[in-house]
Structure formats: C-alpha cells, structure tokens
Amino acid sequence: MRISTLFISSLLLLGTLNAQAQDRDKVSADQMLYEELCANHTTENYHAPFHVDAKKLEMTDESGILLLKGKSFQVKSITSDVYVKKSRKTYTPLFDEKYPVESFNNLLLNRIQDNTLKIDIRQHMYGSIKKVPTIPMQNVYDLLAKTMDIYCSVTSVTKEKMEATLVFHHRRMNFIHMFTVSIPTNQLFEKDGVITADLFGNIPQSNIKSLFSKYHE
C-alpha cells in the first residue's frame, strides 16, 4: 500500500512538473512571437504558390465566380477555400468591391498579391495582453505563412463591419496561432485600411480539439 501511494504521489508530482514546464514553454513561446511581430521587417510579400485544379472548382451563385475547394481545419466552416474569377484560361483570386465577403476571405488566406492594409494586434499572452505596434498586414504572412498552413472563416458581415477567424497551423508541431479579426467594411479596399485583431498564439495540440469543439457549438 505504501509503495502504491508513493507511486501515485510520484505520478501526480511528475504531472505537476510537466504542467509547470509546459506553462514556462508557453510563456517563452508567446514572448518570442510578440518580439517577432514587433521587430522591424522589410515586407517580403511572401505568397505560397497558387495552383488551380479544375476538378476542385465549384460554381457559386455569382456569375463568373468559382470556388476553389481547399481543406478544412477541425470544423467544416474553417477552410482554405479560395474564390476565383476566370479570364480566358486563367484563374485569379477574387478581390473586387462588388464581392466584399469573398474578397475578405481571399485576403485573409494571403491570396491577394498587393495587400496594402495594416493590422492592429492585441496579443493574449500567458497571464497578460500586449499590444503590437501597428504593422503592415503582409508582415504577419511573411513571418508565419512559410511554415504554417492558413485557414479562415468569415463569421459576421454587416454594412458597417466584417469579422472572421484566421488560423495558422503548424502541421509538424501541431500547434496554432488563432486571430479573431475585424475591419470596417468600407476600409477593406482602402490603401491604408486597418484590420484589428486579437491573437491567441501557440495553442498546443492538446487544446486544439477542445477549442474548436467550443467554436463549433
């Protein structure tokens, strides 16, 4: 009995130490991400290669606008789907004032080559919230998109404002950075429009499913 008690106590202590180590790792990872976002960057204008597989194209309710089906992440509504328009034999990601929702989606997925918007980020760090100085939105993609997959979901649209969830997923290490973003609808196509975002970074594998289970609800 004493041996069993000692064994259980040791397991509990080990679990506590592991949790404390994970907490320290989270603090360090959040601080590193914050510093990277705050650092001075020359915009690289990084975009992953864009290929259109005609088999994955679907019609939409809008004439001349097609949906290039991508993948979903955790829930069906968070996807890498891209809206495209066809010109002769060329497909181009849509960014047009006539289609603000589809354009917002494509912008968030980093499919618009000339992204002139800026972004204000409030980073929810371990135990605190820090504000990142206003930066070009493209810098976020230059920093994260080379090693992470991008998914988004436009969650609310009114005449005044659009809101969305933007997810960067590191497949090998299986953690995410999640942004909840919003922009005044009339600023989406402005040269210096500003997106506001709350960033929840370094969400580990163990929390991802429970997080999106709540998101789905």
Image (tube, rainbow, N blue to C red):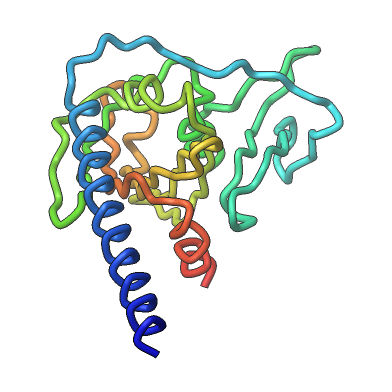
User: Which x, y percent locates residue 168?
Assistant: 46, 38
User: Which x, y percent locates residue 114?
Assistant: 43, 15
User: Which x, y percent locates residue 148?
Assistant: 49, 31
In the rendered view, tell whether residue 103 sits above or below residue 41: below
Viewport quadrant of the N terminus: bottom left
Compared across the picture, whether 200 is left or right of 126 comes to right
Q: Nearer the viewer, residue 140 or 25?
A: 25
Among all residues in the image, which is located at the extreme bottom?
Answer: 1
Q: Nearer the viewer, residue 179 or 170?
A: 170
Q: How many marks?
A: 0
Compared across the picture, whether 132 is left or right of 104 comes to left
Q: Give the image quarter of residue 7.
A: bottom left
Q: Give the image quarter of residue 3.
A: bottom left
Q: Which residue is rendered at x = 27% and y = 45% of the image?
A: 25
In the rendered view, tell whether residue 144 sits above or below residue 74: above
Among all residues in the image, which is located at the extreme right?
Answer: 55
Q: Which residue is rendered at x = 74% and y = 13% of the image?
A: 90
In the rendered view, tell whether residue 186 sits above or below residue 142: below
Q: Give the image quarter of residue 82.
A: top right
Q: Which residue is rendered at x = 45% and y = 62% of the image?
A: 211
User: Which x, y percent locates residue 139?
Assistant: 32, 21
In the rendered view, tell whether residue 35 sits above or below residue 25: above
Q: Nearer the viewer, residue 22 or 18?
A: 18
Compared across the picture, whether 80 is left or right of 8 comes to right
